[in-house]
Amino acid sequence: ARGGSDPNLLQMALAVEEAGADGITVHLREDRRHVRDDDVWLMRDHLRTPMNLEMAATDEMVQIAL
């Protein structure tokens, strides 16, 4: 499980993007075990490549995706 902001997912995603990735896939779990809501918002605001959001089909997750 991920604690705090280590590793910094935005920095990692930007590095992968700089290396030539065509897109970034983010898997937001209901328990927020690895990726948190703020990670999704930061990546949405800073990435230039498409971001694919994988998630459970729950009302909460759908609202986050919208």
Image: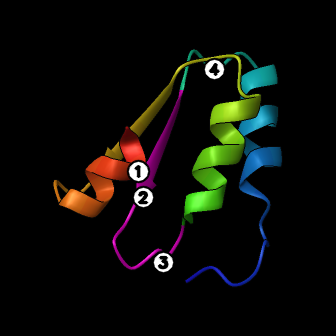
Number of residues whose C-alpha sits closer than 10 Å to that of mark 3, classed few (under 14), some (14–19) or many (20 or more): few
From what the image shows, is residue 56 above or below residue 49? below
Number of residues whose C-alpha sits closer than 10 Å to that of mark 1, classed few (under 14), some (14–19) or many (20 or more): few
Name the disc covering residue 28, or none: 2
Q: Between 38 and 28, which is closer to the camera in this rendering?
A: 38
Number of residues whose C-alpha sits closer than 10 Å to that of mark 2, classed few (under 14), some (14–19) or many (20 or more): many
> Secondary structure beneath disc 1?
helix
Which residue occupies 48% across, 46% down? 26
The stretch in magenta equals 24-34
> Secondary structure beneath disc 2?
strand
- Mark 3 and mark 2 lie on one chain; the one further toward the N terminus is 2
Distance (Cα) linking label 3 and label 4 = 24 Å
Tell me if label 4 and label 1 are in contact, CB under 8 Å. Answer: no
> Label 1, on which residue?
64
Tag nearer the camera, 2 or 4:
2
Q: Between 22 and 61, which is closer to the camera in this rendering?
A: 61
Quadrant, the C terminus: top left
**Dot 2 amino acid type:** Leu
